[in-house]
Image (spheres, rainbow, N blue to C red):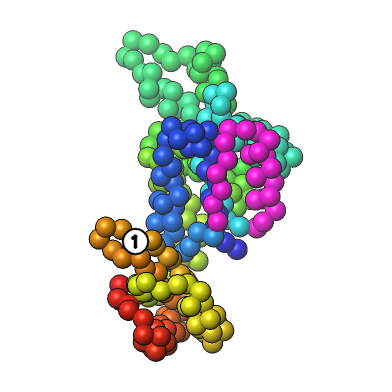
Amino acid sequence: MGFGLIIVGDEILSGKRVDQHLAKVIELLKERGLTLEWAEYVGDNRARIISCLQRSFKGGDVVFSTGGIGATPDDHTRQCAAAALAVPLVLHPEAKRLIQERIVETNSHPEKVVDLNTPDHLHRLKMGEFPEGSAIIPNPFNKIPGFAIRQHYFVPGFPVMAWPMIAWVLDTHYSHLFHQHQYLEKSTLVFEMAESTLTPMMEVLESNYSGIKVFSLPSVGSDTVRRHIELGVKGEPTQVQAAFAEMLNSLTEFGAEFQLI
């Protein structure tokens, strides 16, 4: 079981908004000793969202989805989740209560009783229509909940709402997974050397140490840093230490110029 992220919204793909969710979800997971296995962006297109969710529901991962759960014409995620699971949308009773509480709070007036049956207030209840069988995700910002079904957690696109809701899901449902695996990452900058020269050494290291991954991040350089490769090892700490020491020895034998990070 891994953790995945689906980010929904035309505004991200068109460049009107810069995505902040990917970096934040990686941070939230990392704080808890977890990692993000995959992420996918999808626009406000029902067919594409349904296809994305159908694949995701079959995968068995824990998945967070941000955006598209409102009640305006460009919000499709609730409906698409129901379609992907072939279940109806139903008004969740707790979501209804919370939405009506929010309506009363934002329309309170000492001389006026709030009519919850006006067309606009009834329309707001659509935000509480979730795929049948869903549970709610509390929203500490404005009470309008997200929903959870089959290890998928759907939250608004607004960071101020989405991030604490995702943190709540992790702390409430997945604390048993926190910090299960020790992890270490060590790397060095190798200057003016081709990746092809280093590849055989990298392959030997991964063959010798089953608990590590070797990574290579080339850079063309800049005005302040010469062309280089960030070469490193990540994974189980004891094996990382041994593999990294072997890597440095090999670089020395190559006559490579390198700088520890």
Rendered location of residue 89, percent (x, y): 66, 33
Image quadrant occupied by the C terminus = bottom left
Q: Main secondary structure of the magenta part?
A: helix
Residue 153 in view here: no
Farthest left residue in view: 224
How many numbered discs sit on the rendered protein? 1
The residue that appears at 40% across and 33% down in the rendered structure is: 142
Q: Up-down: is 102 above or below 135?
A: above
User: In the image, what residue type sits under mark 1?
Assistant: Gly
Query: Magenta includes 192?
Result: no
Rendered location of residue 1, percent (x, y): 60, 63
Q: Which residue is mark 1?
A: 221
Q: Secondary structure at mark 1?
A: loop
Residue 129 sits in quarter: top right
Residue 47 sits in quarter: top right
Q: Is residue 223 left or right of residue 54?
A: left
Q: Is residue 2 left or right of residue 84?
A: left
Task: Specify start and end residues of the magenta stretch as a single range.
Answer: 38-60
The residue that appears at 32% across and 14% down in the rendered structure is: 110
Q: Residues within 10 Å of mark 1 (few under 14, many from 20)?
A: few
Q: Nearer the viewer, residue 116 or 64?
A: 64
Rendered location of residue 258, percent (x, y): 32, 77
Residue 187 sits in quarter: bottom left
The residue that appears at 47% across and 56% down in the rendered structure is: 170
Q: Is residue 120 left or right of residue 190?
A: right
Q: Is residue 51 left or right of residue 161?
A: right
